[in-house]
Amino acid sequence: MKSTPTTVEKIWLKSYPAGVPAEIDSSEFSSLKEILEISCAKFADKKAFTCMGRSISYRELDKFTRNFAAYLQSKGLKKGDRMAIMLPNILQYPVVLFGALRAGITVVNTNPLYTPRELEHQLHDSGAIAIVILENMACTLQEVLPKTKLNLVITTQVGDLLGFPKSLLTNLVVKYKKKMVPPWNINGAVSLWSALSQGANAQYTPPTVTHTDLAFLQYTGGTTGVPKGAMLSHGNIVSNLLQTRTWVGKNLRVGEEIVITPLPLYHIFSLTANCLTFMTLGGENVLIANPRDIKGFVADMAKVRFSVITAVNTLFNQLANDDDFKKLDFSTLRLTIGGGMAVQRAVAEQWKDITGLPIVEAYGLTETSPAATGNLLDMKEFAGNIGLPLPSTIITIRDDDENILPVGSTGEICIQGPQVMQGYWQ
């Protein structure tokens, strides 16, 4: 990702769909905090997130996130501090994510499947002083806690936001029947319910958050060395949301879309494409806590009239080969997006035979928030390529000396745009 001269001819604009501008106006929103607050007010009575049969509305999301932000502030966390989130796709994730962002805190997304060594590196490198973690992984944190800067540990159980009595029953099954919670003991750990309760009685002081403030330290492994933290600012993410919304907006209906979200929200693809983009559209995210359980996954899909799904090639393949999936009603499906890895043509063709719609591939990197290119949404058949640069994005192919190469040459993909990260942390 190197600078690109403005003299580059944007030959791709000739292929843009009607109504899609060459540039976006990144100043439309000052931050993700503002986007959340606008969406919660505009879509208050609509469902924001659904998981395991329980939904929370935008109004409830507003209340939960305000209380969590107030709690963090009451514990001394301030704008610019780092907080790790180590959760799968459960309702607690958006609550603590947006609560942290409302407090001006930088979120460090953390894979729940990390080994102690991996977790220690990320916590130490990021300098996180707080973490929200699923109880199932608390034993991993306990092992490395003394080697980190953490001074606030907030734990939650799978069923905590599912409503009584389902929350109690779910937590009992997970802990005692399925034995999915190894023993742990962290002095001073606070439950998320306690944090939300305390936050409800605490003062919330809205911080001023702008494009230059860091929203995420998003760790990415690359091919060499230990994972590095890509510094993604509010401006980076806001820009990518606007780029994505501009690209897909005319195909989607504000306040009506239901998107299936099986990929982990701690991954940049799902975080931006599903969680954040559909928030700007007032959509409902159906969170799939365990997509490896294909039978359970398909059963969850059968309960809603979903209109969008995003996934990776391996997941598309698993679904397409499941007999129960083939029986689902696809009459409301309007868009299927593939990313994260190349989609295989055979998988894409099988998917279209079943659902009637092609898989629209997009391409990007953690370092680009992530979307850089996308295929046209009105395509009738699988394209097998990564599409066109999104608005306000310049892509060139260069040689090792950074010279721009002519069309048809082989070289390094270089990306310029408002969604490109601020750099690598430290």
Image: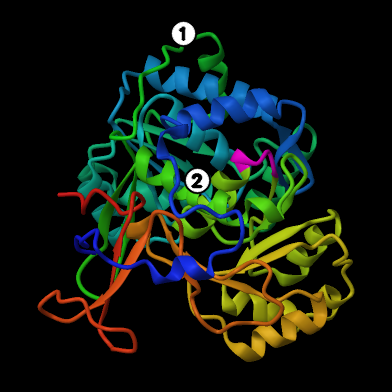
- Mark 2 residue crowding within 10 angstroms, few (<14) / some (14–19) / many (20+): many
Give the left or right position of residue 202, taking residue 217 as reference.
right
Quarter of image, res 369: bottom left
Q: Is residue 34 above or below residue 275?
A: above
Q: Mark 2 points at which residue?
A: 242
Asked if one can make out residue 260 in the rendered structure from this viewpoint, the answer is: yes
Q: Look at 71% across and 59% down and name the residue there.
A: 308
Q: Which of 49 and 173 is in front in this view?
A: 49
- Per the image, the residue denoted by label 1 is 203
Please state if 191 lies on the left or on the right of 345 as rendered: left
382 shown above or below 88? below
Residue 28 position within the rendered picture, expressed as x and y whole percent measured from the top left = 47, 33
Question: Where are the magenta residues, as a range?
Answer: 279-283
Callout 2 secondary element: helix
Q: Where is residue 311 in the image (x, y as percent from the top left)?
A: 60, 68
The local crowd at label 1, few if under 14, some if 14 to 19, many if 20 or more residues have their Cα within 10 Å, is some
Q: Residue at x 69, y 43 (%)?
A: 283
Tell me the amino acid under the disc marked 1.
Answer: Gln
Amino acid under disc 2: Leu
In the image, residue 350 lies at what x, y percent? 73, 86
Q: Point out the frontmost of discs 1 and 2.
A: 2
Residue 211, quarter of the rendered image: top left
Which is nearer the eye, 321 or 172? Answer: 321
User: Vertical placement of 12 versus 322: above or below?
Assistant: above
**Residue 277 is covered by the magenta coloring:** no
Q: Residue at x 33, y 54 (%)?
A: 417
